[in-house]
Structure formats: C-alpha cells, structure tokens
Image: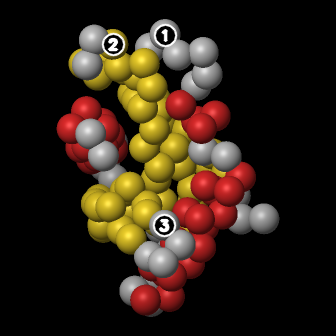
Amino acid sequence: MNSLGKLAEIKACEYLKKKKYKLLDFNYVSVFGEIDLIMQKGQTICFIEVKMRNQNSIAAPAEFVDYRKQQKIISTAQIYISNNNIKLQPRFDIIEVYSENNKIKCIKHLENAFELY
C-alpha cells in the first residue's frame, strides 16, 4: 500500500477515536483477506474498510467495495470473532477518504454499509 493509503487508514482511525470508538485491531489479516480497522463502540464491533479516492473521482470510494470484497471482509470478520471469542454485535462500515493533491480533504463514515448475506 502506498503511504497516502496508509495515512488514510490512520486518519480514519483518529476520526473514529474522536467519536468514542475504541481500536481493537489494525490491518487484521486472515486467509480470506484483510480488514483495515476493527473498532468497538458500545456493544457493537465494527469491521471497517477504508477506501480513498481523489476528490474528482467519477465514483464514490464505497463503490469500489464490491460484493466479492464484502464477502472477503465478512469471512475475515467471522474468523476474528471466532478466534477472539467476541460477543458483540457485528457491523460492517466503510470510511470514504477523499484526497486532492496528495492531501486528505474529507472523511465520510458509512455505518452499516453492507450486511451478512
């Protein structure tokens, strides 16, 4: 991942911490894929995909989290829940990060961006 992509993940994490989310894991990897951020708010565990695009992009960052990517995140989340004996309600979020001239301009948090099918 490029350094701007890593910065986007760090900024997304800081953004959520300001909203009283607690970081549980960062870049969690399983055989199925990776989850950028795993955070907790109250009785909810949030599996968060961070997507960054240029502010002038033709599509929103969330549009790049297709069904196949969602299934990889869900499978990885199920492993995390099982391995860590998690009893919290799972939720799948997307953080959209918009950049311009290699600088982060805007962050949008999409709660419940997708669900278990």
Kind of residue at badge 3: Gly
Q: Are marks 2 and 1 in contact (CB under 8 Å)?
A: yes
Tell me the CA gap for discs 2 and 1: 8 Å
Residue 29 location (% of width, % of height)? 39, 71
Nearest to N terminus: mark 3 or mark 2: 3
Residue 76 location (% of width, % of height)? 52, 72
Kind of residue at badge 1: Asn
Taking the spot 30% from the left edge, 66% from the top edge, the residue there is 25
Vertically, is 44 above or below 61? below
Tell me the CA gap for discs 3 and 1: 28 Å
Nearest to N terminus: mark 3 or mark 1: 3
Quadrant the C terminus occupies: bottom right
Nearest to N terminus: mark 2 or mark 1: 1
Residue 15 in view in this figure: no
Look at the numbered disc 2 and give the secondary structure of its residue: strand
Q: For the residue carrying disc 1, how many other residues have a C-alpha within 10 Å: few (<14), some (14-19), or many (20+)?
A: few
Disc ID at residue 56: 1
Tell me the CA gap for discs 3 and 2: 28 Å
Disc ID at residue 100: 2
* Residue ID for mark 3: 33
